[in-house]
Amino acid sequence: MEKSEEVLIRVEGVSKRFCKSLKRSLAYGMMDITKSVLGIPLSKQLRKQEFWAVKDVSFELRRGECMGIIGHNGAGKSTLLKMINGLIKPDEGRIELKGKIGALIELGAGFSPVLTGRENIYNNGAVLGFSKAEIDKKLNEIIAFSELEEFIDMPVQNYSSGMKVRLGFAIAAQLEPDVLILDEVLAVGDATFRMKCFNRISEMLKNTAVIFVSHSMAQVARICDRVILLKKGEMISAKSSNLAITDYLSSIKLSIDTRSQESSMISILKGYLADESGNELRDIVSGQTFQCVIHFDVKNFQELDRARFMAVFVDYELNSAIQVDQDLAFDSNGIFELKLNFEDLCLKSGKFYINTVILNGARGEFIAAKDNLINFTCTHKKDGYAPVFVNPIASWSKSIEVGN
Amino acid sequence: MKTTIYTSDNKYSLKKIAVEIWEGFLEGQGLAYQLFKRDLKASYQKSLLGVLWLFIPPFFTAGIWIFLNDQGIVAIQDTPMRYAAFALCGSILWSLFAEAMNKPMVRFQTAMSMLSKLNFPREALILNAFYEQLFSLFLKLLVLIPVLMFLGYYPNWTWVWGLLGILGLILVGFTFGLLICPLGLLYMDIGKALPLVLPFAMYLSPVIYPLRSDGVLLKLQNYNPVTPFLELARSSFGEYDFVMWDAVGIWTIVLLFGFGLSLVIMKISMPVIVERSGF
């Protein structure tokens, strides 16, 4: 990505206060309007029931750079974006933007449901700031991008929600801004279309300064050079995307409803991670050798027939990353300990949960389970978003055939 | 390259704001026209009577009064033109004012979700309301002129004054409509009160009865910005003497100033309103 020294976004000590009570918020609103019209300065203190939704955020962004903003719900991401987009005013600080500003926040704004897709291209285009002549010129490209040729003369109310969003994105994709604001817009449409959107955004990245808000760490890791993490409106960290994402992920407290089912034959007692010498581990470093120790209580070993134990490593987005399948055969009742030894297992950074089940019988009947038996945090030095990294044995040789 | 700055500062330079508003109107033209076309096309897609709905209400009002007058139930005498024409003119002109007063707030309310997510020139919505108002005027003239001709009032050059009077009515409506906008967008009360207050205000104004020369209504009439413009328009259609030139002059100056002020207030209050819009 080409970078230049040209600073396009400069945010200096920006804060925004919100009020917890609507009635009060409206009254403060009236007061602020009256004061502003009369030219009376506003106080910068918190008034009753107010809190800082965004507090003292500063950063700079140059052309060609992409910055991610991550944080939990209510951390102030959207509020910050709204201020940068000029929709609401900061209560403290200053925002300076250079050039044309484009925001992909709501796709398909201005659509009228009873009008056709074609007519609505002009409506949405006008809201985004295109002139009629510009849209005339881009019309075919927009329709082609949306892949809705067949339905373009049908009222939009007959479109599926995915189709509406495709049309909306196709129009917004025609923007050529200097500053681009993206808020969760890549979470649209089916997989093929998402890929197409992603590619279009990557193209736009080259010549713009981009602010990208997303809950998908995979996307953030993929397109952002750096990331700021917001927590309760404050900027916790501003660093390379990998480090900020790790910060964010380790702050996630998922309280998974632990499903637990016992059987009269066998139950899963407990589990933990341990290092090579058997000491219990809370966290691991990606690639480190570790053991996964699980205790079973076998109560009726004769009834177990072709029993299998399964453990699934689930990441913070609840995607299954790894599955372990282990046959179980016991010759007596009692407590048994299973040790699974992992060498060279390179997980991505973040929190993982291990869900376990025991299946029995020819048809694999589900007899016992314990979700979230073990949870741990993995840290990784490399950027990446796939659940598992592998280090295949690589070999090089010089090819004799040239080309082809 | 254009530099945009947003600060917490609420000291505005009037000149800068005036320039921004002007630029907003210029940049917003295309959007205003597009939204106008959209709403026009869309509003009659799902209606059997379609555009007819624009004509029905004023005819109803006028019809009721003509009927009541014919039956002698209300004795409205000494109207300077035939009562049917007088009442029809009055109610159509009043409806132009009332629509203009309602329009800005309704326009902003319906666009609130867009306003809170996208940054486009807010003035486009005011311009859009104006386009809608002109269209409504056009449709109403389409009814009014043939009816007046049927009743014996033929178009002539003095009708140009009538159009000026109508523009004055729209100016009154927009100015008051925009001034109540910030309050009306934050609180629902204004929206609830308007449909109650406006008809009441109509009966207090000389719309379906001629100008008063004494009593409480005379006093009210002197402070009513609608009356001079309405009378200017009606007298030129009905070819009777217009006696309120002074009021027209004073109100025009006051309203032009007020309109400018209302634009500035809108500009300043929009971020505060968007913040609390709930979208």
Image (cartoon, coloured by chain):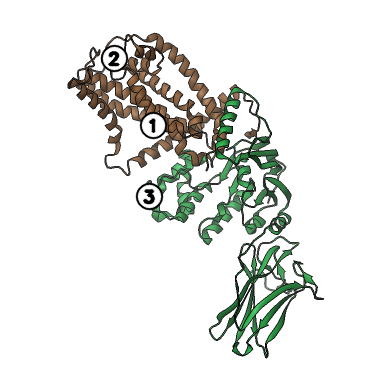
Chain colours: A green, B brown
For residue B132, the mark is: 1
The quarter of the picture where the C terminus of chain A appears is bottom right
- Camera-side residue: A347 or A115? A347
Q: Residue furthest right?
A: A277
* Tag 3 secondary structure: loop
- Camera-side residue: B237 or A328? A328
The part of the image, by quadrant, that contains residue A295 is bottom right
Q: Are marks 2 and 3 on the same chain?
A: no
Q: Amino acid at mark 3?
A: Pro
For residue A141, the mark is: none
Give the mark toward the camera: 2 or 1.
2
A394 horizontally vs A18: left or right: right
Image coordinates of residue B27 in percent, x first then y, are 51, 32
Which residue carries the number 2 mark? B210
Point out the tag, 2 or 1, that comes first from the N-terminus: 1
Judge the density around disc 3: few (<14), some (14-19), many (≥20) Cα neighbours within 10 Å: some
Give the CA separation, mark 2 to mark 1. Answer: 29 Å
* Tag 2 secondary structure: loop
Seen in the picture, residue A365 relative to A216 is either above or below; the reply is: below
- Camera-side residue: A211 or A355? A355
Q: Residue at x 48, y 27 (%)?
A: B180
Q: Amino acid at mark 1?
A: Glu
